[in-house]
Amino acid sequence: MTDPARTGSGGGFAVVELFTSQGCESCPPAEELLTEIERDARKRGEPVFALGFHVDYWDYLGWPDRFADGAYSARQQAYARAFGSGQLYTPQMVVNGTVEFVGSDRRRAATAIASALTAVATTPLALSVEDAAGGTGGGHRVVVDYQTERPPERAVLNVAIVERGLVSEVARGENAGRTLRQDNVVRAFTSVGLDTERGRVELEVPPDLDPRQASVVGYVQNDGDRAIVGAAAIDVSAEPG
């Protein structure tokens, strides 16, 4: 059953997306901040949902980020178009799809999250999860059932699997010689049109995913202005509700 402390079905919530890369020397402080944001929110029972999207455009420096995906770079590009900046940079933090800033800026992050938590979630969302073995390529799939209310027209449901406690020894690139510990790393992601209030989403996840350290984050986003209007999270290892 979804933990009500990890949903945004009543008051405000904050979806914090960080665009980052292991090949970027400015990114580790932002990743540490993302870890703190998620850890502190769990302690306080606040609906703050942290996601680390690793982009692939730093890979040319000689260190291919094992968590990077071109789809995450494309997601960041879509935000750049929505913000009217056309600019891609790391680390970049985006809160609730509408506020962006340098991802290591603690003051801006605290202000944006506090503001988001005072808003009202207009589209309640609830999740339940089933971890089902038997995917292709040696991996497996996570099946997520969702229920929402009053989804906006042309809204999409984003569903991510994020994993905590990941460690990488970086041999090349700007962070050569460093050991990076990263949390809330997006390991699988999909977006589906939200045409009905109930449905099911299946995600293929990497075979090395540790379900004990993973969570599902779901969030409803307007297709036009990119504003996020509802969110919830549940641990992958939780019992289906």
Image (cartoon, rainbow, N blue to C red):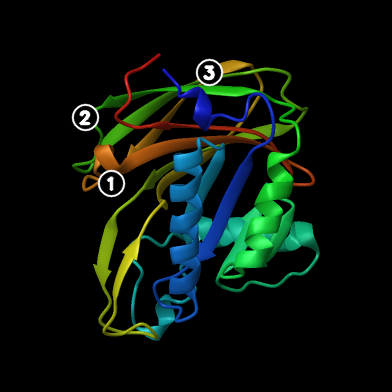
Q: Is residue 28 above or below residue 157?
A: below
- Cα distance in 3D space between marks 2 and 3: 21 Å
Residue at the disc numbered 3 = 199
Residue 193: % across, % down: 63, 30
Tell me what residue is drawn at x 26 percent, y 84 percent: 177
Q: Is residue 45 above or below residue 115?
A: above
First-in-chain label (2 vs 3): 2
Characterize the local packing of mark 1: few (<14), some (14-19) or many (20 or more) Cα atoms within 10 angstroms: some
Characterize the local packing of mark 3: few (<14), some (14-19) or many (20 or more) Cα atoms within 10 angstroms: few
Q: Is residue 160 above or below residue 32?
A: above
Q: Is residue 164 left or right of residue 234?
A: left
Residue at the disc numbered 1 = 206
Q: Secondary structure at mark 3?
A: strand
Report if residue 55 is visible in the image.
no
Tell me what residue is drawn at x 51 percent, y 49 percent: 50
- Cα distance in 3D space between marks 1 and 3: 23 Å
Residue 23: % across, % down: 41, 77
Which amino acid lies under the numbered mark 1 shown in the image of this protein?
Pro
Report if residue 8 is visible in the image.
yes
Q: Which mark is residue 191?
A: none
Q: Which mark is residue 134?
A: 2
